Image (cartoon, helix red, strand yellow):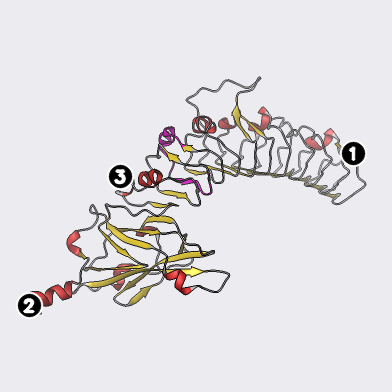
Amino acid sequence: MNMTLLNFDECEGLTQIPDLSGLPNLERFSFKNCKSLITIHDSIGFLGKLNSLNAVGCSKLRSFPPLKLTSLENLELSYCYSLESFPEILGKMGQITELVLEDCHIKELPISFQNLTELQTLQLRSCPRLRLPSSIVMMPKLANIIAWESKGWLFPKQVEGEEKIGSMVSSNVDCLYLSGCKLSDHFFPIILEWFANVKDLNLSRNNFTVLPECIANCHLLCKLTLDACHSLREIRGIPPNIRQLSARNCKSFTSSCGRTLLNQKLHEAGNTMFSFSGARFPEWFDHHSWGPSCSFWVGKKFPSIALCIAIGPTHLEHVEIVGPIMIINSIECSLDEEENPYLYMLPHHTHIFDLQHIVFSDYLDRFVSENEWNHVEITYSVEQRFEEKDKHAVTQISIENGIYVFKQNSSMEDIQFTDPHKKRRLDVDPEL
């Protein structure tokens, strides 16, 4: 038969998928939300032209036949609550680049999972029993593992039948998201061995208490997210090439954590953007001011600078500090909203960032006059969302902000923190 499409979606009474070997030209087969489906004939795994297979929501399906589908591009198995095993992959299947498993009770991925040779992204959501095979580090194209709410998820573990993988081998995964996976302190040695090449690591909403020294061995790691890790209270190590770090709403964060993240050596080379719980201003900054704004004067070239804003606590809810707003010679320099919106900063947090992370709609030098000193004001707006603004309480929020000049890129002679025009007038007439 020449049938290319077969759709059994929402067939409530369907309990089994019959022999389909008589449909060799089938390209798309969907039987999603067949709530009574229990068994599938093995022939489905040998349809050579099949490129899409959708079994989403087959809640009673307990097993899936082995697959040898060299044309398959799309495999959907989410919400198969009774499915305990991922199907065996018989031979190389090189068309699947992304796989999403959501609300599945699959216990493990088989060793043959590595036969998905072109898989680039694996997304796991609410898969509480899933165990990854250690062979996952051998998948050459796998670059992204993204897991949400996979509580109880076990990390790669050498199991019987797997090829022994040397400790020097680590995966090509450079983006690893493990948000809300109930990870404790014990997982770090495992994750840092198997995923040593990670560049973007998201560990938000987990249970570990210490960021260990060994994370400094992740030389490629440049972005680390630790938001809402409420038990995190100690930072012993920092990746040497870290550029972006977010540790917002970490309730157990200590002043020691803040000191570590404000170490001048981390920010001296520029290009960093850190945000973390607690209000602490770096002593090594060149200039600081109390309140939501600071002013300075620049010469004919805008200097390379970092900004820091340390915001005190407040009893108010839904408060955000928005900025930075840059005003040069009374002209506001608008942000490029497509490239990056304003930063939304939280009370009782510290935010430190290189100004080059903020993309303006035009070069700042365009607003600078070459013939005189230029007045610059950097300000932040305090906003209260969802309710009428308590103006008095908002003004009581303690804010300290300031700037640091990157000396390797800029001269301190090109920046003044007191009005140079006033100084010039005093030089001309000392009696003023």
How many other residues sit within 10 Å of disc 3, few (<14), some (14-19) or many (≥20)? few
Crowd band around label 1 with a 10 angstrom C-alpha radius: few (<14), some (14–19), many (20+): few
x and y percentages locating residue 183 in the rendered image: 57, 37
| Residue 18 badge | 1
Tally of numbered discs? 3
- Under circle 3, the secondary element is helix
From this view, report whether residue 16 is shown above or below residue 398: above
Gap between marks 3 and 2, in whole Å?
42 Å
Q: Give the side of residue 145 with respect to residue 394, left or right.
A: right
Q: In this image, 374 relative to 273: left or right? A: left
Tell me if residue 242 comes above or below residue 215 in the rendering: below
Question: Foreground: 355 or 352?
Answer: 352
Q: Residues within 10 Å of mark 2 (few under 14, many from 20)?
A: few
Type of amino acid under label 2? Val
Residue sitting nearer the eye, 85 or 281 = 281
On the rendered image, what quadrant is the N terminus found in? Answer: top right
The residue located at (19%, 59%) in the rendering is 412
8 or 200, nearer to the observer: 200
Q: Which residue is mark 3?
A: 265
What amino acid is found at the position of numbered circle 3 in the picture? Lys
Horizontal relation, residue 371 to residue 335: left or right: left
Q: Which residues are magenta?
A: 211-230
Residue under numbered circle 2: 428
Q: Residue at x 37, y 56 (%)?
A: 353
